[in-house]
Image (cartoon, helix red, strand yellow):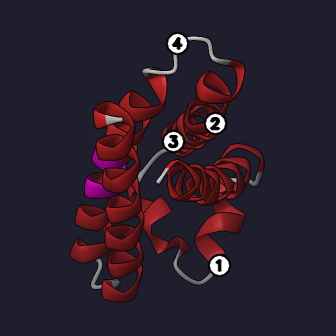
Amino acid sequence: MDIALWIAAGLLAVVALIGGSTKTFVPKEKLAAQGGGEWTEGFGAGAVRGLGILELLAAAGLILPAALDIAPVMVPVTAVCWILLMIGAMVVHGRLGQYKLAAVNVVYLAVAAFVAGGRFLG
């Protein structure tokens, strides 16, 4: 079970790292021009960058506390925060009719729930 939790947390961390890097370092206008980036039109550049920074922190929070054995409880706490972020993403994508992207968010939410439950109970 521990290996499955590490794999799940690692996959989520990669997703968070890629998404966070993109939102943090790619200009909002360029993000909006990409497929699936229409959601950025409803947010300011600072909000998009803020979401990116939160995702970068999530990438670190899903791995580093357990790997360094410093406050490992932060891994499931981060996973719960990721769940909340995915709920917000599902709402935004759903309002725009981007149901495929919302479905991807459901998958990420499920993986985060697995990590949170496994780490809180384990």
Q: How crowded is mark 2: few (under 14 residues within 10 Å), some or many (20 or more)?
A: some
User: Label 2's element?
Assistant: helix
Q: How far is mark 3 from mark 4, CA to CA?
A: 24 Å
* Label 4 or label 1, whichever comes before in sequence order: 1
Instruction: Give the residue at mark 2.
Output: 63
Magenta span of residues: 83-87
Residue at the far front: name it. Answer: 1
Give the residue type at disc 4: Ala
Q: What element carries label 3?
A: helix
Q: In which quarter of the image is residue 42?
A: bottom left
Quarter of the image with the C terminus in it: top left
* Residue drawn 37% across the image and 28% down it: 77
* Displayed quadrant of residue 7: bottom right
Q: In terms of sequence position, does the residue under pointer 3 or pointer 4 come before the other?
A: 3
Looking at the image, residue 10 lies above or below residue 101: above
Residue to which mark 4 is pinned: 71
